[in-house]
Image (cartoon, rainbow, N blue to C red):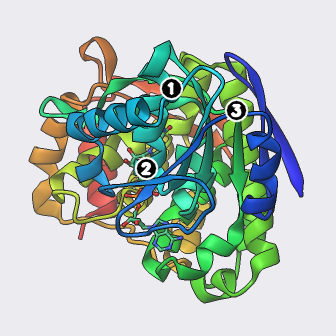
Amino acid sequence: MRTIPVSAENTYQIEVDVDWRTSLVDWTEGRSNVLIICSENFPVDTEFPTIQIPDGESGKTVSTLQNLWQKFAEHQIGRDDLIVAIGGGAITDVTGFAAATWLRGIDWIAIPTSLAGMVDASIGGKTGINSDAGKNLIGSFHSPKAVLIDTTWLETLTPRDTAAGLAEVIKCGFIQDLQILDLLRSKKLLDVINDNQLLVELIFRAASVKAEVVSQDFRESFKREILNYGHTLGHAIEKHSKYQLRHGEAISIGLCFAAELSQIKNGLSPHLVALHYEILESMGLPTRYPASAWTELELLMNSDKKNRVGQLRFVGLTATGECNRIENPNSKELFMAYERIAL
Ligand SMILES: NC(=O)c1ccc[n+]([C@@H]2O[C@H](COP(=O)([O-])OP(=O)(O)OC[C@H]3O[C@@H](n4cnc5c(N)ncnc54)[C@H](O)[C@@H]3O)[C@@H](O)[C@H]2O)c1
């Protein structure tokens, strides 16, 4: 087992490469009630009472929350009890929010089962649901007591979902941890899927990047913004594709766009820009998007909640591991960057 410390409202640890059942035992001792929340599509067999909820974005709703609050009442969940979320990022997001709101905040543990959940969604304390106004607009910061990462879950993940999770891992390589890029260079997706030791190392490194960034900037000012590298266009592409593309697939295209924009605005070296395409494509991720989508994507980027005070802003790279903020690039510069990734 390897551990990563996170300091948020409280200090807790991400335990990497554990057997989740064994690790969970320590957290359940002395609690009268432990309630497991998992997905209807991906049920988990445990000795504790278990509630299954709808999965994915369709599960991040007020009605799921109402159902969870009802179940918490039925199970008489009190302040000393424990909620355990087992699933992808959607399950940990909605369960964490239910834990944040029950009795004004009770303890919960995140056991992510998707790669995206292990390196991103379960870390950082953000919990929440979707609404008609948009994704993740309702939520709260409520960190788990621990994140337990057991890579045996990944054996049932589809190659497409593994690749989507790797997009966030690769992002961490470009913004902070060069070694991630070295580990992935000249590898193919199947090499990664079939090499558990490599997967553990990649998860440890990417989770460490996120943990370090959120520990320095829990409530999100500039430092935490570097995690949004590739996300300004990525979010717009995700919406434009009507969520047909996985989050990580949209981010992969967004990363190439951010690299091209960084070349235009920061003089990022052509070699580093090319490395984005090389590594992402070798993991089977998309790096290009139709030219005809640009007008709509520009509108979508301008309406994104992350682009505060009406300013369109991007995280850029000046070198590997060095980020800056690119504020209000003009339409010509944006289009020039988009043309380079357009199909
Ligand atoms: N809180 C945060 O900081 C944060 C950060 C990033 C993303 N998110 C959220 O995370 C969600 C995306 O997470 P995700 O990519 O894990 O998607 P997801 O939770 O929608 O899961 C994707 C699919 O994978 C399945 N699945 C999960 N684990 C599996 C496994 N081991 N084997 C087989 N199938 C498995 C799920 O049942 C689901 O159908 C989004 O809702 C996003 O908003 C939150």
Tag count in the figure? Answer: 3
For badge 1, the amino acid type reads Arg
Q: Which mark is residue 91?
A: 2
- Whether ligand 1 has any atom under 8 Å from the Cβ at mark 1 is answered as no
Determine whether label 1 and label 3 are within 8 Å by CB. no
Q: Identify the residue at horizontal 23%, vertical 33% (top origin).
A: 62
* Label 2 packing within 10 angstroms: few (<14), some (14-19), many (20+): many
Residue drawn 74% across the image and 42% down it? 28
Q: Is residue 171 visible?
A: no
Observer-side mark, 2 or 1, equals 2
The answer to whether 10 is drawn above or below residue 129 in the figure is above
Q: Which residue is mark 3?
A: 145
Compared across the picture, whether 42 is left or right of 176 comes to left
Tell me the quarter of the picture where residue 341 sits.
Answer: bottom left
Q: Which residue is mark 1?
A: 325
Of labels 3 and 2, earlier in sequence is: 2
When the figure is inspected, residue 288 is found, relative to residue 255, above or below; the finding is: below
